[in-house]
Amino acid sequence: VELVSYFLLCLFIARSKQTALITAGVAAIYHVASLALGQDWAARYFPFYAAILPFSIGASIYYFNENISSFNANTIRRFFFLSATLWVINLIACGQISGLGGDHFSLFFYINLFLLVCMVVPLTTSAFDGQLKRIGKVLGDLAYPVFLTHWVVAFIISSLFLDGQHRGWAVFAASVLPSILISYAISIAADKLVEPVRDSVRNRVSRKSPSTFAAAQTERAK
C-alpha cells in the first residue's frame, strides 16, 4: 500500500497544490461513500486507494507551509501540544469505548486522522527548531524501523520466554527495549550505508542539470 502510494505521490498527487487538493477531495468522497454504504472499516484502511486520503492530505500540507508559518511560534507550539493531548485521549477512549471493529470505531478513526493532521502541520514550521526538532529527528529515524520490526521481535521473545503469548503487558514490556535497540542499529546502518548512496545520486543530478536541481531545491525550500 505504501509503495503504491509513494509512487502515486511522485506520479501525480504531489506535483502541485491543485493535484494534491483534488486527490484529497476525491479520496474523501470515497471514504464518505464507503461510510454511507455501510462498508467495514477495513475498506477504508487496507486498499491503496483508501490510503490515498492521508497521503494527499500530507502533500497538501506541504503546499500550505507558508500560510501555516505566518502564525506566531508560541501559538503554533500550543496548537501542537493541545492536538497531541487530544490525540492521546482519543486513542484511550477508542480502546475503552469501542476498540477495533466496534460500533463507534469509524468515529474514533477519523478523529485520529484529523488530530494527526493537526499535529503534523505545526511540525512543518520553524516553531520547533532547536533541541525539540533534534529529538523529533531521532524519533522519526526510529519510527519506521520500530514499525517494521516490533512484531517480529515480540514474536521471537514470546516464543522463547513467554510460552507463545500473543498479547498483553508482559509481551510489551519484554519486547519494547529490544525493538528500540534493533531499530536504532538499523537507523545507524541506514545513515552510514544508504545516505551516502543517496547523496551521490543527488550530486550526479546536480552536475548534470544544475538549473533544474536548483529550481527543485528552491521549490522544496518554499
Image (cartoon, grey):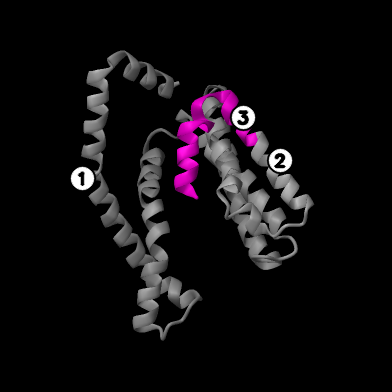
Q: Is residue 11 visible?
A: yes
Residue 106 on the magenta span: no
Name the quadrant containing residue 129: top left
Q: Within 10 angstroms of label 1, few (less than 14), some, or many (20 or more) residues?
A: few
Give yes or no for contact between labels 2 and 1 (Cβ–Cβ under 8 Å).
no
Circle 3 residue: 21
Left/right placement of residue 26 relative to residue 15 reads right
The kind of secondary structure element at disc 2 is helix
Q: Main secondary structure of the magenta part?
A: helix
Disc number placed over residue 22 in the picture, else none: none
Q: Earlier in the sequence, mark 3 or mark 1?
A: 3
Residue 165 percent coordinates (x, y) = 46, 81
- C-alpha distance separating marks 2 and 1: 43 Å
Q: Amino acid at mark 3?
A: Leu
- Residue at the outermost top position: 211
Name the mark on residue 192: 1
Check if mark 3's residue and mark 1's residue have beta carbons within 8 Å.
no
Compare residues 127 and 165 and report the one nearer the observer.
165
Is disc 2 surrounded by few (<14), some (14 to 19) or many (20+) residues within 10 Å? few
Q: CA distance from mark 3 to mark 2?
A: 12 Å
Q: Secondary structure at mark 3?
A: helix
Q: Is residue 18 magenta?
A: yes
In front: mark 2 or mark 1?
2
* Residue 87 sits above or below residue 71 on the image: below
Sequence-wise, the earlier of marks 3 and 2 is 3
Residue 170 x, y percent position in the rendering: 45, 77
| Residue hosting label 2 | 29
For badge 1, the amino acid type reads Lys
Magenta-drawn segment: 1-24
Q: Contact, CB < 8 Å: mark 3 with mark 2?
A: no
